[in-house]
Amino acid sequence: MDNLINNFVCSKCSGTFTFIKKNNTQTGLYCSRCGKWIKWLGKEEIRLYERQLEMDKIREGEILENSLSQFSDEELLDEIKRRMKKGVNNEKIISKRM
């Protein structure tokens, strides 16, 4: 399962992000880019996937905190404005890699 989460490459679109979706009694793993079904997940795989998501969120928060802690309050506001402007200009949607 760890391989699918961290090293997944979709055979249809070459996407590298995944999501899980519950369908009645089963939960499937899908490509986030094109929606292709990859496989049905067992209970343990679902728990591992959800745990990996939690760990990734914690790591992302730590990385953001560390990258922004170098700025003074005024510099921080300028940096936030710069990042927001860059995100809007690029029309970039941030996706979570699984």
Image (spheres, helix red, strand yellow):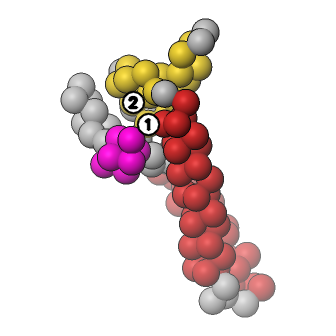
Q: Are marks 1 and 2 in contact (CB under 8 Å)?
A: yes
Q: Position of residue 97 (x, y in %)?
A: 45, 48
Q: Residue at coordinates 45% horizontally, 46% vertically from top-left?
A: 98
72 is within the stretch colored magenta? no
Which numbered disc flags the more N-terminal residue, 1 or 2? 1
For label 1, the residue is: 18
The structure residue drawn at horizontal position 63% and vertical position 63%, both measured from the top left corner, is 58
Q: Can you name the residue that lies furthest to the left here?
A: 11
Question: How far across and down, in percent of the image, does residue 4 sit?
Answer: 35, 41
State the predominant SS element of the stretch in magenta.
helix
Can residue 2 be seen in this snapshot?
yes
Could you say where residue 60 lies in the image, as x and y percent from the top left? 58, 64
Q: Which residue is mark 2?
A: 31
Which picture quadrant has residue 67?
A: bottom right
**Quadrant location, the N terminus:** top left
Q: Nearer the viewer, residue 72 or 11?
A: 11
Q: Residues within 10 Å of mark 2 (few under 14, many from 20)?
A: many
Name the residue type under label 1: Thr
Picture residue at 39% right of the left edge, 30% below the top: 31
Which label is found at residue 61? none
Looking at the image, residue 65 lies above or below residue 11: below
Q: Secondary structure at mark 1?
A: strand
Front residue of 14/2: it is 2
Q: Position of residue 76 (x, y in %)?
A: 70, 80
Which image quarter: residue 22? top right
Q: Which residues are magenta?
A: 1-7
Q: In the depicted view, which residue is nearer to us: 78 or 2?
A: 2
In this orientation, does residue 91 appear? no
Furthest-right residue in view?
Answer: 73
Check disc 2 and give the amino acid type.
Cys
Q: What SS does tag 2 mark?
A: strand
